[in-house]
Amino acid sequence: MVSSSLSAQPAAPAEERGTYRNPFIDCPRAADPTVLRYEGKYYLYPTLDGKGYEVFVSDDLVHWERKPKCYTDIRGGVWAPDVYLHTDGKIYLYYTVDDGSATSPRPFPKQIGVAVADSPLGPFVDRGILVKGAIDAHLFRDDDGSLYLYYVNLPGGFRIMALPMGDPLTPKGKAVEVIRPTVPWEKAKGQVTEGPWMLKHDGTYYLMYSGSGADGPDYAIGYATASSPMGPFTKYEGNPIAKRGNGIFGPGHHCVVEGPHGDLWLVYHQKQDDQVNWKRFLALDPLWFDEQGVIHCRLSRGTDQPAP
């Protein structure tokens, strides 16, 4: 969770920080990244082989060391992790996994579960399933300590839900639909709203998400705002804020993390080309709020950029 009350513009780059270039990590086909900042280090968890989650560790968001898997699951189809450090000192991994009922590659019967560890490197111990027929979990902790699980409900078509949680393992109350595909960019390939990520800035809740099919070049990122974590949310009229163009294809399914110098960074994936496929790589680029509270980002590929 990033609760932002930072300056309106990204921090001025310092020459001594050096540069980075996307893809910022040598890990072909990685996607759906989440990053945890823990005791001065960054821990990156992507979708990779569908069998579990590797961990990559960095001091600066630029140089990464690959570590062994922190979680494996024999059910397969392990996707889109979310990792959360709670006030009890434990780390909670929200995973997406097959539910065992699939008889063909599509549709994907999926479910969301949670596992717990004492270290970001794991091992994470499974604590059971939270939601069936769902993908792409993200846990948000509000300033008052309240917890909310955002996820994508598949029955009825890629609807983002908000579920109050009594604690990191226990739902409390009923899930409410907060986002569904309604506008053209979300329907460029299929009708999709997924990959939720919550930011809070100056008392406003910003629910970021990705739209269109993730295997297509028009996959993109937008956001909606509300005065409550449960909505109702109003989609930003300037969506999508991250989209194809200038040699960039299918930017999406992201997280946001605070960099070493206090500015915000978008960690996401791009597609290798403009074809329909799952060839993706991880990317890192700056994100900021302007004085009117609008989110901006600047995407790059294959060029040197000022490092975090």
Image: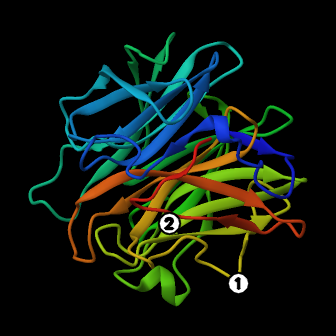
**Image-based side of 262 in relation to 300, left or right:** right
Number of disc labels: 2
Residue 145 lies, with reference to residue 298, above or below; the image says above
Query: Which residue is rendered at x = 90% and y = 53% of the image?
Result: 202
The circle on residue 237 is 1
Toward which corner of the image does residue 166 lie, by quadrant? top right
**Image-based side of 108 in relation to 2, left or right:** left
- Percent of width and height locating residue 232: 76, 68
- Percent of width and height locating residue 139: 60, 40
Q: Can residue 175 be seen by looking at this rendering?
A: no
Check the picture and name the quadrant holding the C terminus: top right
Q: Nearer the viewer, residue 147 or 304?
A: 304
The circle on residue 210 is 2
| Disc 2 residue crowd, few under 14, some 14–19, many 20+, Cα 10 Å | many
* Residue type, numbered disc 2: Ser
Provide the secondary structure element on which disc 2 rests: strand
Residue 229 lies, with reference to residue 179, above or below; the image says above
Query: Which residue is rendered at x = 24% and y = 29% of the image?
Result: 73
Furthest residue in direction bottom, as rendered = 184
